[in-house]
Amino acid sequence: MHNKNGLVLIVDDVDVNRMTIKLSLKKEGFDFLEAKNGLEALDIALEHKPDVILMDAMMPEMDGFEATKKIREHESTRRIPILMITALEEKNDKIRALEVGVNDFISKPFDKTELIARCRSYVQISNLNRQYSLATINPATNLPNKLALQKDLSKSQKEEELFLIQINNFNENENFYGSKLVLDLEKEFSFVTGNFFNSFSKSKLYHISSGKYAILLKNSTLLDDQGIEEYCINFIDMIKNSEFSINENRFNVNVTMSYSKGSENLYENANQLLNAAINQKREFLYGEDMIKNLKEQLTINLKTLNQIKNALKNDLFIPHFQPIFCNKTKSIYKYETLIRMRDEENNLIYPYPSLINVAKSGKFYNQITKLLIEKVFDKIRDTGMEFSLNLSSLDIENPQMCAYLLDSIKKNSDISNKMIFELLEDKDTEDYEVVKNFINIAKGYGIKIAIDDFGSGYSNFMRILEFEPDIIKIDGSLIKDIATNQTAQNTVEIIKLFADKIGAQTVAEFVENKEIYDKVNDLGIDYSQGYYIAKATEELLREKVFDTLEEV
């Protein structure tokens, strides 16, 4: 740590000259370092990082010009102000000094007042430079950070190449192993990464954020597709096969990569590719076509986000109701609530998966869910009919949403026995105890619980037993083939037998034609739902729709 007045390095091969400079500056409170030649000056500058260097021009071993050039080659000393104290008056000498990185000149014999004023001024500049350096350095690894990368890219006028690297599951590792171990891991990882990319003549490694790195290739021959793939595959394999040893702990690391080239939006393009690779669980992504597709998707997402905002603002999210048909009484018994959205031209938009994903990423999903719950309770109060709506186990795990659900149930406790929550298991569910507790409380108010899409990817018989559902909705992937596929039929029979054993009713989804409807009835399924019965509509359908049902 330098004293507040500054640390001055005096470089001169003549002892008397160095002493004279020190005496001239002594009363200013500076600390001093001394070097007898350029070689010593370079070593001292790298070790101590002085605030100002007063450099003689002509010295043995290494003169002031060469020493300045060498000092400017190192990132840590590149911005230190260098004043050349010289008797040289030739214009070419001064031009040469400026070209190697000298900031200013003081002529011999120097004026004491001028020397003091120059040193004070450049110490202030050095302090500003140091603040800038701190702002552009990642303290974990002392590598240049994202701000430094953006500065470097803004100065570039030509096409360059950029790799981005993300350590997979970094936050989970930090939570599990602790910040100290992960910090040491990052240092080791950055060392290994820097060595790998040293094969490029001019590469620069940046530490963008926790677990995220960038490698900028300057003045390199642009890689072709094969070269990009080879570098990504080789680096990923090298990291996979490396064992990082930190304080007797050994870590294996996996990474995701992206690559982009160009002179504009280089980081933004590479970052979009990296995020896409992570979301798609790909090891790496690159390519102009891929970037173009991502930008087009981003445009679509922004448009969708604006539509969602407009729909929330103008009450354009409209519940639609699909009848659930009782196979025994041959009548509509209840309805599943499905959300629809109208755009600015009043066109009806179905909530396709990407719309839901955009709503979640834009933090509007919970608002939509709350709006739907409110409207369904209003519909129950108006009609006295039973209605169901979909809830993900992740909705229940969300403390704010869970609190809202329970509050809505309590406020509508007089009609809550007409509400059915269709639960959809999610592979990312973390705390099933929270879900079970919610179910128990909701059931205490008369809420019925249905398990949606049973027979699909994440269904679990033991989990069903824990949830104690009132209704099991058999997934459409089984029902749509039930009339022609014996395996699907056998599976549905097992689900029906299981439901009977636990006292749950069954609903067949995706009943699309008479053949499916007949088979569902033959198997004793309690309810049918699908286009053969009716599509979802804004107004409630009170009677069966197709005449063919009357033949049953």
Image (spheres, grey):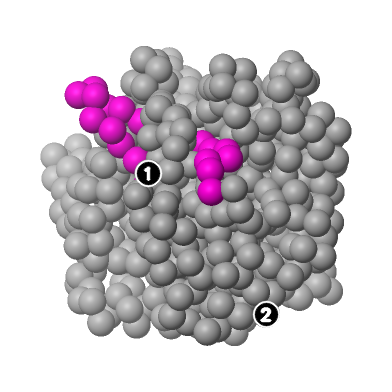
Q: What element carries label 1?
A: loop
Q: Residue at x 56, y 64 (%)?
A: 521
In percent of the image, x 25 and y 82: which residue is there? 226
How crowded pointer 1 is (Cα within 10 Å; few <14, some 14-19, many 20+) is rated as some
Which amino acid lies under the numbered mark 1 shown in the image of this protein?
Answer: Val
On-image quarter of the N terminus: top right
Estimate the x, y position of residue 219 in percent, counting from the top left: 22, 64
Find residue 464 and name its label: none
Give the percent coordinates (x, y) of residue 422: 63, 45
The reply, left or right, for residue 493 in relation to residue 414 is: left
- The x, y position of residue 296, in whole percent, is 22, 48
Q: What stretch is highlighted in magenta?
A: 330-352
Q: Where is residue 207 in the image (x, y as percent from the top left)?
A: 51, 53
Residue located beneath label 1 in the image? 545
Task: Examine the residues drawn in magenta and state their main secondary structure.
Answer: strand
Pick whichever, 51 or 285, lies toward us.
285
Instruction: Decide if residue 43 is on the left or right side of residue 500.
Output: left
* Marks 1 and 2, the one that precedes in the sequence: 2
Q: Mark 2 points at which residue?
A: 243
